[in-house]
């Protein structure tokens, strides 16, 4: 995954993680605007629903890669 890729936010199975994530964003499509790390965990800042939010890489599904 890299900046410019279109991604879909995957649903979270764990009820604990659901409480920590932005529920309205689940299933929505966004674009990666920055690659980041959260305590050594790869993450990305994603523009979704008109706001920038940070998600772990395993919470994202790549739909279209930028070239």
Image: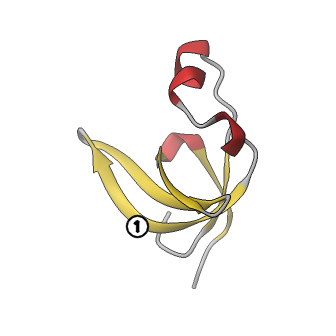
Query: On the image, numbered disc 1 is attached to which residue?
Result: 34
Q: Position of residue 57 (x, y in %)?
A: 48, 47
Q: Is residue 13 above or below residue 32?
A: above
Q: Is residue 44 above or below residue 67?
A: above
Q: Position of residue 50 (x, y in %)?
A: 63, 64
Between 42 and 21, the residue placed more toward the observer is 21
Q: Residue furthest top?
A: 15
In the rendered image of this protein, does residue 40 appear above or below residue 30? Answer: above
Q: Quadrant of the C terminus?
A: bottom right
Query: Residue lying farthest bottom?
Result: 67
Name the outermost residue toward the front: 50
Q: Is residue 21 left or right of residue 48?
A: left
Asked which secondary structure carries label 1, the reply is strand
Q: Quadrant of residue 27?
A: top right
User: At 44% across and 56% down in the image, what residue appears?
Assistant: 44
For the view shown, which residue lies furthest in the left direction? 39
Residue 23 image point, x, y percent: 66, 34
Q: State the image quarter where residue 19 is shown.
A: top right
**Coloring scheme used:** secondary structure
Q: In percent of the image, x 59 and y 79: which residue is there?
A: 66
In the figure, residue 49 lies in which quadrant?
Answer: bottom right
Closest to the observer, 23 or 43: 23
Task: Give the mark count.
Answer: 1
Residue drawn at the location 64% of the way across and 28% of the way down: 12
Neighbour tally class for label 1: few under 14, some 14-19, many 20 plus, Cα within 10 Å = some
- Percent position of residue 46, x then y: 53, 59
Q: Residue at x 55, y 33 (%)?
A: 21
């Amino acid at each position: 995954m890299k900046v410019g890729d279109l991604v879909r936010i995957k649903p979270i199975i764990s009820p604990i993680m659901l409480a920590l994530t932005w529920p309205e964003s689940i299933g929505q499509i966004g674009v990666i605007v920055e690659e980041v790390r959260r305590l050594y965990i790869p993450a990305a800042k994603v523009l979704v629903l008109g706001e920038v939010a940070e998600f772990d890489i395993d919470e994202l599904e790549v739909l279209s890669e930028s070239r």
